Amino acid sequence: MADPPVGTVEPLAAAQADIFDVSQRDVPMLRKHAVGLAGVLFLTVTGSAPISAMLFNTPLVVGFGNGLGAPAAFLFATIILTIFSVGYVAMSRKVTTAGGFYSYISHGLGRELGLGTGFGAVVAYSVFEASLCGGFAFFLNQKLSQIGTATGAGWLNGVQWPWLALIMVLVISLVTYFDIRISARVLGVLLIGEILFLLIFDAAMIGRGLLNSTAFTFEALNPVKAFQGFGAVGTLAAGIPAIGLFFAFWSWVGFEMAPNYGEESRDPKRIVPLAMYISVVGLGIFYILTSWAPFAGYPNLNAAITAAQTNAGQFYLGPAQQYIGLGVDQALSILIITGSFACGMAFHNTACRYFYSLGREQVLPAALGRTHPRWKSPHIASITQSGIAAVIVVLFALFAGRDNPTQQAYVDLYGLMAIMGVIVILAVQALVSIAILLYFWQNHGTEVHWWSTVLAPIISFAGQAFVLYLLFTNIDFVSGGLAFARWLGPIDLGIIALGVILAFYIRNSQPEKYKNLGRLIHENL
């Protein structure tokens, strides 16, 4: 039998004749068996950035959302996202690919919508990296100013935030150019550090709360509290439960990246499902405890809410300094910097794999689908992503300014780009749930299960759609009142529409290429 011509892949001899195997010798492949369960967890959980999720989001959940019910909001999010994972895991056992959302939706809802959401996912993870560069630059700028003031090194006070953000882009680009195992190790060290110090904080504060604190109460774990706010008291604004729920869900963005590393994991049918469940449930338990612990540092609930509304940056650091000491507050202030870096790197890796998937299917330039001859990394896709992140940073530096890192790096770059990405991820996760249901009904009828492939996806779709509704109904608050935020939804929709239109064009003009859309999987394991 003659070898297939270069640039093509043979269809698998499987039930689905339109699935193609990337193990054919003419398709550039990622490094096989590169990472185990721990590696996949490091690559994905860092995307959720536990320390950023807690120090950034919890004060908002407490101060403007659920008050005492903040842990209940995280509990509700844990339940919904665990249900989402049930169907997502069932799909990952059938389709192993670096394309993630793009491939799953292509299989369940058609190539057109699949390519549209693929474009959306590329943009989401791409802007997430730029967003975290803004957060990194903001916190590093603050730390350098503190060091400069303490040591008399005044030049540290004058380092402008765009240079710090661009340094982060450069370092991430250098690390991710090489073997994926290097990224996994770097992220592993950073992730363990931030979780370790947050657990020290949790243990000390919960221990104190159980012994002596009127603000620390088990009522915080009552699920009903997830849907309750609190009334305005004096100068305190009233809490809106929808805001608390949205920021709770936002804290998980990144955990869904596990299937994107299926082709590089040692046993994807086992590792990807385990990584999904460990990350969503593990983060859930961790978030519930870590959002509950700070209450023990305040004399009463009103004091905790006041601190969350008026001095969010000290909501955790204040109690850590007052009741724990031992440099825990200083460690957390440093780990928020390294955590932002790790989160940006995790999103960079996922964006690269979307570029790689679309490149090897020749939807985007084919060069993006090449892998390094030695490191087997999607090196061209990685350099491309670094260039995009750098351009976004430069655009914000030019048009937002360089002199006020709080407004420009944190509120504008970090805030707006994070919202832009979250809109896509919530919408795509909702569509993935429907795609899973239809995929099993259409292709694996004998394996349809009332829970994992029917009811769980339906509940998941409703939950994701509800959170998306919360986002749009509270967009002014979430964005800090920035008018441009109202355009982010239409911009995201336009990007997805562009992908759908391109898919229709390919279907009519290049039918052979159209067959490959979302159909390149790893060895049909």
Image (cartoon, helix red, strand yellow):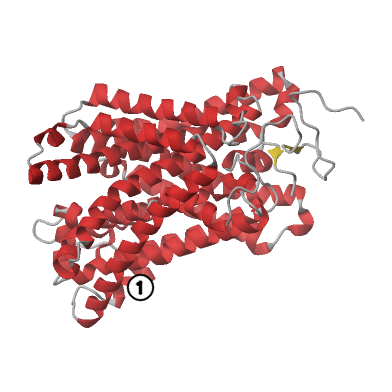
Q: Is residue 76 above or below residue 92?
A: below
Q: Residue at x 59, y 21 (%)?
A: 365
Nearer-the-camera pick, 382 or 150: 150
Residue drawn at 17 percent across, 70 percent down: 323
Q: Position of residue 317 (x, y in %)?
A: 19, 59
The residue depicted at 45 percent of the width and 38 percent of the height is: 175
Give percent across and percent down for residue 461. Answer: 53, 51
Residue under numbered circle 1: 222
Residue 232 visible, this angle: no
Of all residues, the one furthest to the right in this rendering is: 1
Residue 272 in view: yes
Judge by depth and name the residue closer to the eye, 4 or 286.
4
Q: Please, what is the three-letter code of the amino acid marked with disc 1?
A: Asn
Residue 499 on image: x %, y %: 56, 27
Q: Secondary structure at mark 1?
A: loop
Q: Is residue 106 left or right of residue 331?
A: right
- Quarter of the image with the N terminus is top right
